[in-house]
Image: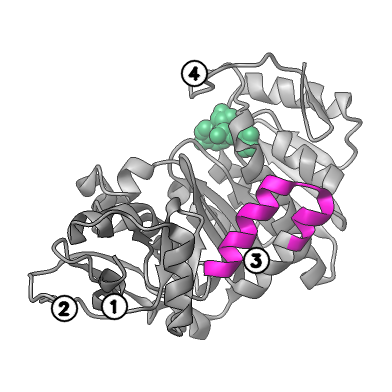
């Protein structure tokens, strides 16, 4: 028997759960679920109506059981899994936790979504690998003003280890740099907006982040071709200088480095605007704090602080290497840049990195 946040699961602990597990449960995804609970609560409160939810790739059912128990304003949850063993196990877990609002199905994720046209206020797509395969059907199942949560674990693809797969799956070129995960999150957001826009739906990213082996994205869907067109104007490129570490996001690629004249490499197309909405994340962080989920509260607080700085983060060790100097203390460096009037913060992407809108020549002078 397992337990997560008061939910009992009729499962044995597995050290390395994977695709071939009889029923999939990963305790390392608890923070993903903690943050998802608070995102859903904040979204529900903004909508002022009870939510009908779909989790089409449910595994053990832990996520939906937590939503039912921890989020106010839930009318009903529809969960499904293609694996009959998972469905049997979910049914046991529902009994064990005296669930009243969850209906279970043994169907393909795309089938359960397409059967429920414009039904859901929230769809949570939490698969093995890429959620992109389920997004077209999620688009059909979501109500106007609803929300979508997505987990991507195909980081080797989005972060640049498999370039051709990334081009094929996400229609973007990734780039292996120290900040490849921010590039990956931006490619992921672009792909979600692009897919939904085919359905005349706009997607507003409210929280996008990276943790260890996955990216998570939570956002709002609106029936509006006009808004979708506006979002597409925020697709562009990341131009990167491997010599001096200059980087810039823009609608067009930059060919030569404005700092050192080196030829630049690029990633994209990708999302060039904020990856999280500060006001939304601030509410999520407060909700997590109220629940006593300290690790997740601290983590989202950091995302809140960095969310207004669009320039991708700098890894301090890489800047020290380029400058041939010792790496200064991160806190000191951040406060120096802030004192000069530059927006600067730590970043959730890496404990040794920072975000700033200071120009690269000025940053390098601090080393
Ligand atoms: C990563 S696990 C889900 C974890 C779960 N959401 C959680 O928070 O613990 C992915 C699940 O998707 C199921 N699955 C894989 N392909 C599917 C498909 N095409 N339709 C529905 N379920 C599928 C697998 O059986 C597995 O249980």
Picture residue at 23% right of the left edge, 57% below the top = 325
**Label disc, if present, on residue 259 of the rendered structure:** 2
**Label disc, if present, on residue 281 of the rendered structure:** 3
Picture residue at 32% right of the left edge, 49% below the top = 159
Per the model, the C-alpha gap separating discs 1 and 4 is 51 Å
Per the model, the C-alpha gap separating discs 4 and 3 is 35 Å
Q: What residue is pinned by disc 1? A: 362
Taking depth in this image into account, of 354 and 254 the one nearest to the observer is: 354
Q: What percent of the width, then of the height, locates residue 242?
A: 16, 61
Q: Earlier in the sequence, mark 1 or mark 4?
A: 4
- Does 31 appear in magenta? no
Q: Earlier in the sequence, mark 3 or mark 1?
A: 3
40 vs 26, left or right, is right
**For the residue labelled by badge 4, is the local secondary structure a helix, a strand or a loop?**
loop
Q: What percent of the width, then of the height, locates residue 67?
A: 78, 46
**For the residue labelled by badge 3, is the local secondary structure a helix, a strand or a loop?**
helix
Looking at the image, is mark 4 or mark 2 nearer the viewer? 2
Q: What residue is pinned by disc 4? A: 20
């Amino acid at each position: 028997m397992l337990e997560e946040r008061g939910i009992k699961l009729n499962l044995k602990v597995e050290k390395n759960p994977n695709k071939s597990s009889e029923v999939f449960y990963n305790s390392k995804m608890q923070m993903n679920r903690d943050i998802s609970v608070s995102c859903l609560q904040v979204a529900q409160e903004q909508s002022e109506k009870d939510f009908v939810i779909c989790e089409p790739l449910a595994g053990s059912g832990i996520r939906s059981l937590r939503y039912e128990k921890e989020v106010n304003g839930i009318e009903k949850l529809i969960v499904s899994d293609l694996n009959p063993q998972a469905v049997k196990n979910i049914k046991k877990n529902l009994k064990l936790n005296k669930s009243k609002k969850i209906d279970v199905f043994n169907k393909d994720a795309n089938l359960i979504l397409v059967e429920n046209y414009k039904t859901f206020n929230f769809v949570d797509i939490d698969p093995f690998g890429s959620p992109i395969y389920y997004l077209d059907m999620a688009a059909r199942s979501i109500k106007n003003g609803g929300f979508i949560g997505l987990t991507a674990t195909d980081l080797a693809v989005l972060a640049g280890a498999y370039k051709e797969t990334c081009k094929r799956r996400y229609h973007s070129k990734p780039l292996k740099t120290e900040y490849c995960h921010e590039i990956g999150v931006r490619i992921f957001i672009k792909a979600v907006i692009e897919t939904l826009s085919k359905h005349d739906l706009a997607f507003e990213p409210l929280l996008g982040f990276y943790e260890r082996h996955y990216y998570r994205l939570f956002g709002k869907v609106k029936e509006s071709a006009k808004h979708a067109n506006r979002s597409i104007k925020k697709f562009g490129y990341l131009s990167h200088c491997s010599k001096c570490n200059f980087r810039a996001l823009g609608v067009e690629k930059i060919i030569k480095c404005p700092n050192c004249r080196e030829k630049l490499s690029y990633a994209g197309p990708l999302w060039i605007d904020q990856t999280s909405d500060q006001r939304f994340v601030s509410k999520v962080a407060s909700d997590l704090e109220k629940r006593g989920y300290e690790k997740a509260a601290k983590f989202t607080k950091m995302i809140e602080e960095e969310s207004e700085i669009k320039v991708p983060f700098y890894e301090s060790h890489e800047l020290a290497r380029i400058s041939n100097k010792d790496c200064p203390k991160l806190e000191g460096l951040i406060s120096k840049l802030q004192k000069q009037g530059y927006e600067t913060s730590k970043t959730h992407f890496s404990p040794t990195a920072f975000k700033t809108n200071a120009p690269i020549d000025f940053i390098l002078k601090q080393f």
